[in-house]
């Protein structure tokens, strides 16, 4: 039973009952802090249920969640045989008792007003999906450099959920909150999307006439990948799966999605020109290097720490990884004929 001394909150029938869904897989280093930040929220905890949906963790994640559940009866640990985040969210949708469902990420920390602000915005009918701004943070020399780069528009073209300073409608948000009925009406997340499932869902919301809103006061601290290989793999997968989304939802395409791939192809063309004695082939590499230098100097000025010395390499790694993923995804999904809908909430 919940120790009443651990919380001063009381159930408030005037507050919406909220389901919080947290997909996890081997998150022993993050899950406790994530849950702790959730229960430090200024939303009444008696009006919450927290579904931690585990994709088969082999570390201490499950034991840590069970330990937290002994302190907070609102926490339930669910199994996700499908392992991916789309099926985790569909399990949460099918189990949700709340009229509002909010997705959280174990890698992130949340401000006290996070849940309340989402509930308020949804209840006022201002949007069908409400989320915050992603604030990358990193522990360690490389991760700190990567976080510094990802906080700039030069890294990924200035997506609204990364750079917004005022509440505004956007193509997507970081994580999100919905009326549970909205997700069920859309038949949940598409389990054919292993990555980019949130963006694909937002495309369907917008195509159905819904609105997606970024509320920048809800800054979510997001722990970036700790090493170059993990970061490269992450952004390759982003580019690869973004192309599947664009293949099935042409309205999802934005010019910035194709800039890294275009840069790579231009670099290949430049290299071919240089090898054939065409001096003009140096133009594109020089322009990119100049842009890289300017962006890196800006990072160094704003951060003022030694990790900023890695900024040129980090920017190039992000652009190269996403660009290669885009090219690979374009080739892979060119003949893809899966249906745009047909999702389900059964996981």
Image (cartoon, rainbow, N blue to C red):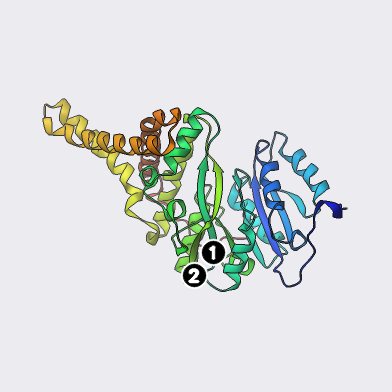
x and y percentages locating residue 330 in the rendered image: 36, 46
270 sits to left or right of 148: left
Instruction: State the quadrant of the C terminus.
Output: bottom right
Is residue 43 in view from this perspective?
Answer: yes
Nearest the viewer among 318 and 248 is: 318
Residue 228, numbered label: none
Q: Earlier in the sequence, mark 2 or mark 1?
A: 1
147 sits to left or right of 25: left
Tell me the element at label 1. strand
Count neighbours of disc 2 (C-alpha within 10 A) and say few if under 14, some if 14 to 19, many if 20 or more. Answer: some
Nearest the viewer among 316 and 140 is: 140
Q: Residue at x 78, y 55 (%)?
A: 74
Residue 129, numbered label: 1
Q: Are marks 2 and 1 in contact (CB under 8 Å)?
A: yes
Q: CA distance from mark 2 to mark 1?
A: 8 Å
| Residue picked out by circle 2 | 210
Tell me the element at label 2. loop
Is residue 55 in view from this perspective?
Answer: no
x and y percentages locating residue 219 in the rendered image: 54, 52
Give above or below for 328 relative to 131: above
């Amino acid at each position: 039973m919940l120790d009443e001394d651990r919380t001063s909150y009381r159930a408030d029938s005037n507050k919406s009952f909220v389901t919080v869904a947290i997909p996890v897989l081997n998150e022993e280093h993050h899950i406790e802090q994530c849950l702790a930040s959730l229960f430090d929220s200024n939303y009444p905890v008696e009006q919450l249920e927290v579904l931690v949906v585990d994709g088969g963790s082999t570390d201490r994640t499950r034991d840590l969640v069970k330990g937290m559940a002994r302190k907070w009866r609102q926490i339930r640990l669910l199994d996700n045989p499908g392992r991916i985040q789309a099926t985790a969210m569909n399990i949460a949708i099918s189990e949700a008792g709340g009229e509002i469902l909010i997705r959280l990420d174990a890698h992130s920390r949340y401000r006290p007003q996070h849940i309340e602000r989402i509930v308020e915005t949804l209840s006022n009918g201002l949007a069908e999906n409400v989320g915050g701004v992603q604030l990358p943070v990193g522990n360690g020399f490389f991760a700190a450099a990567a976080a510094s780069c990802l906080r700039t528009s030069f890294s990924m073209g200035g997506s609204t959920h990364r750079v917004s300073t005022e509440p505004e409608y956007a193509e997507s948000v970081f994580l999100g909150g919905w009326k549970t009925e909205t997700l069920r009406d859309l038949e949940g997340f598409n389990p054919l999307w292993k990555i980019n499932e949130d963006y694909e869902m937002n495309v369907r919301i917008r195509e159905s006439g819904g609105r997606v809103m970024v509320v920048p006061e809800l800054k979510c601290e997001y722990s970036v990948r700790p090493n170059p290989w993990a970061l490269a793999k992450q952004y390759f997968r982003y580019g690869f799966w973004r192309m599947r989304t664009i293949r099935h939802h042409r309205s999802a395409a934005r010019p910035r999605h194709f800039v890294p791939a275009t840069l790579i192809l231009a670099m290949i063309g430049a290299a071919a020109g240089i090898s054939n004695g065409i001096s003009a082939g140096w133009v594109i590499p020089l322009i990119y290097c100049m842009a890289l230098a300017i962006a890196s100097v800006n990072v160094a000025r704003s951060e003022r720490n030694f990790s900023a010395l890695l900024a040129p390499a980090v920017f190039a790694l992000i652009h190269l990884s996403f660009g290669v993923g885009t090219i690979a995804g374009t080739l892979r999904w060119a003949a893809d004929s899966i249906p745009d809908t047909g999702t389900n909430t059964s996981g």
